[in-house]
Image (spheres, rainbow, N blue to C red):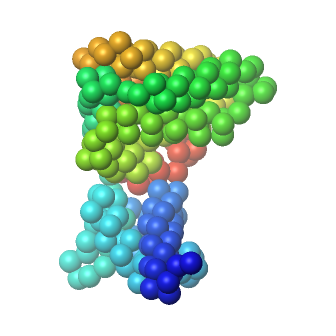
Amino acid sequence: MKSEPDGRRTRATSQSLKAVLGVRDLVMSGSFAPGERLSEPVIARQLGISRTPVRAALARLEQEGLLEVIPSGGYSVRRFSVSDVIDAIELRGVLEGTAARLAAERGLSPARFAAFGSLLTEMDKIVAEPAERFSYEAYIERNAEFHDMLKDACNSPLIAREIERVTNLSFANPSAFLQAQIELPNFLGSLTVAQGQHRAIIGAIEMREGFRAEALAREHARLARENLDFVLQDERMIERVPALSLVAD
């Protein structure tokens, strides 16, 4: 049975995590305009928590690069340029490529390869579904799981933490621009290409081909860059990616 101090610590941790996730979601969903000052009391009411974890969350999100410190005090939502988005995607590719290379060089356990194999088989089935039965939510969940497993495969907490940090910027997320394209005729075809790259990355890791695994992972990240370019050409698609509301013209 937990002691009272341990219980308080657990509740505090839960509140801190809720604050970070809640504030991040509010910002990346476009609830606040770029440059807008964030009010601790307002956010605390919206999230149903006290101001203390909100204050800590704002400081953490400033360190992540999502917010900016206002000289007179407090925080505002950061404005991003298209170049910032491109650089964030490129950085994710570099980091995931490094994770894939190190995983190949250091090797994975049979259990971890089995986990990748089961996940990839499940993703194959999702991607193979006809358009009328395709589950976007299922694909997004499994795609996130694949990238989470990849960042952890190199057994480097430092690299995993930096990958997580950059993917916390929603427009650098592996699935960032898919929602905007879901109704396009070639949408499932593009996912088939991505799934082929997933399998190729794990295949290279299994063969201990570090540089090939790195190149494949970096090439895979460039799909997000291509998706960004495609979305930016159509204002109707831009409106389907709330995080792009933070990007200046």
Position of 15 relative to 21 (above/below): below
| Residue found farthest to the left | 71
Q: Residue at x 49, y 33 (%)?
A: 146
Q: In the figure, is residue 56 to the left or right of 3? A: left
User: In the figure, residue 186 lies in which quadrant?
Assistant: top right
In the image, residue 148 lies at what x, y percent?
Answer: 45, 40
In the image, residue 6 lies at what x, y percent?
Answer: 46, 80
Nearer to us in this view, 69 or 59: 59
Q: In the figure, is residue 181 to the left or right of 198? A: right
Q: Residue at x 28, y 41 (%)?
A: 156
Q: Residue at x 46, y 67 (%)?
A: 17
Position of 36 relative to 156 (above/below): below
Nearer to us in this view, 148 or 171: 148
Q: Is residue 147 visible?
A: no
| Quadrant including the N terminus | bottom right
Nearer to us in this view, 55 or 163: 163
Q: In the figure, is residue 72 to the left or right of 12? A: left
Q: Residue at x 52, y 38 (%)?
A: 145
| Residue found farthest to the right | 132
Position of 157 relative to 150 (above/below): below
Q: In the figure, is residue 136 to the left or right of 20? A: right
In the image, residue 33 lies at what x, y percent?
Answer: 44, 64
Q: Is residue 167 visible?
A: yes
